[in-house]
Image: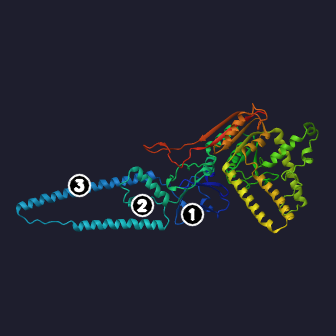
Amino acid sequence: MAGNVINLGDYVVIREITGSQKLIQIKESSQNFYLGKYSIKGSDIIGKSYYSTLSLEDGKWVIGSILNSEEILKDILSLDADAENSQVDEEKSINHIQELKKKRTRYNQLLGREVEVDSDNSNSEKELGDEHDELEKVKRKRNEILSLNKANDSHLIRSLALSSSSFKNKTKFSKEKYIKKLQLRYLKQIILLPCTLLNIIETSSCQPKIRSDKLSPNSVGPRWGQCTVRIETMGNILTHGNISSGSKVLLYDNLSNGIVGGSIYRQLCNIGSLFEISMNKLTFDTFEGYFHGKLAISFEAIVNDQKPKVHYHTIPMSALEIFYKEMEKIPDEFYDENQGFLTEKLDIKHEWLNYKINTHSKGVLNDEKSQHKKKRVHNRINMLENLYSEGVDTVILVIDQVKWQTTVNLQNNRKQSTIENTNNDSNDINNSHSNYIQDDNSESYRIVDEKTIYFDIEKMIQVTQEYLKPGGKLLIFTPFMTTELLQIHQDLCLSTRVENSKFHPFIGVKLEETFIREHQIIDQRTHPTMDANLPIFSGFLLSAIHIS
């Protein structure tokens, strides 16, 4: 099947033997991809089929086969059983010969003949020497294989297991666990997986290799991590939000690194529109949409389309707030009579919505760039006007509050260091000049605070609800249960009964918890996977229906 072969420019998920995964795009055949302590080139992957297993032999990646710990253990046990049977047969034959010798000796003694006494010391010494030589030979072979990096040889695992003095005394479960540990330590294998939505989500949410000896080699899937969007969460978001072709979705996501955005964009089928909220004041949009490479690799791999993303738009959060407040000031009858009012006359004091504010790094814009910026601002205002008048079908907020708090702490530390530097410098200048610096710094402090003013779930709902159409869905996902989330749930429930509520009227308010649990299917040990490092619950999903 031609579609099963990896070509230049394709996305590939690389799964290591420890279960950890990495998403890559092969842009060049000479490109190196690092996997822990070793690396693989793009030329080693191009031309291979998906689901192929590659093993590192003599410094080269070649097609290999997956070594199953259960099969290796069965081979070892069968070898042990054969060895025990042969040993029993040999002991029986030796005992039989000794019995014959004893009978013959007794018969000769009765006849008065001389009896020759056989000594087995030389034979036993030879046998001990042979066993010692055999053990040394196995050790030398193991060292030779390890020195040549031929760590994919199943005979190596067998020899390492059999060379252990305590291996034979272990239980069957302990033997299998010991073989897995040997595989994780000595084998260098990877599996090439296609970039399906499941594999990409697993790659984003699998745990790092903190305790690799606890992971299952060549397992079906990686271990799920915390603080991420997992498969059950993504399914709930698409289902609760009723995302389909032709939908308009307003999204904020600082948790999944493009997983949610890519899944929604693919669901829209190039008919609807995805508007993603940014905390920055400027975006990288163009007239034709977002070009390939400007978005997260997870987003690009899920969509898997090299064309510009014409149905994807990024809007600063501050621009959303300023625009709807400006629109509330405009009388309806005045707007109906002036169709070109917004694009020509509206003067919003925001650099994203005002082409007169120069944000170019070189300070001066030539005529061509100035015209391009004016055209972009024209398109942005028309887009926001359409959002405000028609509304979006769904507002999705995927929030990691720990990242918010980390950013706030960094901003506060910078602010504190700036204050200390200003106080030190003020000792060497006059009072008037010092007052000028203090005023200037207070303005910079205000700008710094604006970066974190929207790091509040309540504030984000108050802004985004202005663009949500009646009957639209509001979804909030967060990995943590906080008092802020519970308070928002209560305020949304009371929004239809309390005057001067913080929010518009919402109904159908629900708070759900999503979880996933893997099962291990092993002979006589089939049960849910029990691992303290394996989190079951992924987070909390708050949903509500906008009615006003």
Which of labels 3 and 2 is toward the front?
2
Q: Specify the quadrant that holds the C terminus.
A: top right
Q: Earlier in the sequence, mark 3 or mark 2?
A: 3
Q: Is residue 109 left or right of residue 77?
A: left
Mark 2: secondary structure: helix
**Residue at left offset 77%, top offset 63%:** 423
- What amino acid is found at the position of numbered circle 1 in the picture? Tyr
Can residue 544 be seen at all in this image of the molecule? no
**Residue at left offset 66%, top offset 50%:** 402
The image's mark for residue 160 is 2
Q: In which quarter of the view is residue 101 placed?
A: bottom left
**Residue at left offset 86%, top offset 64%:** 433
- Image x and y of residue 374, in percent: 88, 53
Which of labels 3 and 1 is toward the front?
1
Q: How far is mark 3 from mark 2, CA to CA?
A: 31 Å
Crowd rating for badge 3 (residues with CA inside 10 Å; few <14, some 14–19, many 20+): few
Can residue 357 be seen at all in this image of the molecule? yes
- What amino acid is found at the position of numbered circle 2 in the picture? Leu
The image's mark for residue 439 is none
Q: How far is mark 3 from mark 1, CA to CA?
A: 53 Å
- Image x and y of residue 25, in percent: 66, 57
68, 534: nearer the viewer? 534
Q: How far is mark 2 from mark 1, CA to CA?
A: 23 Å
- What amino acid is found at the position of numbered circle 3 in the picture? Lys
Mark 1: secondary structure: strand
- Image x and y of residue 5, in percent: 61, 54
Q: Which residue is mark 1?
A: 38
Q: Which residue is mark 3?
A: 92
Compared to 123, does 191 lie above or below? above
> How many numbered discs sit on the rendered protein?
3
38, 396: nearer the viewer? 396
Mark 3: secondary structure: helix
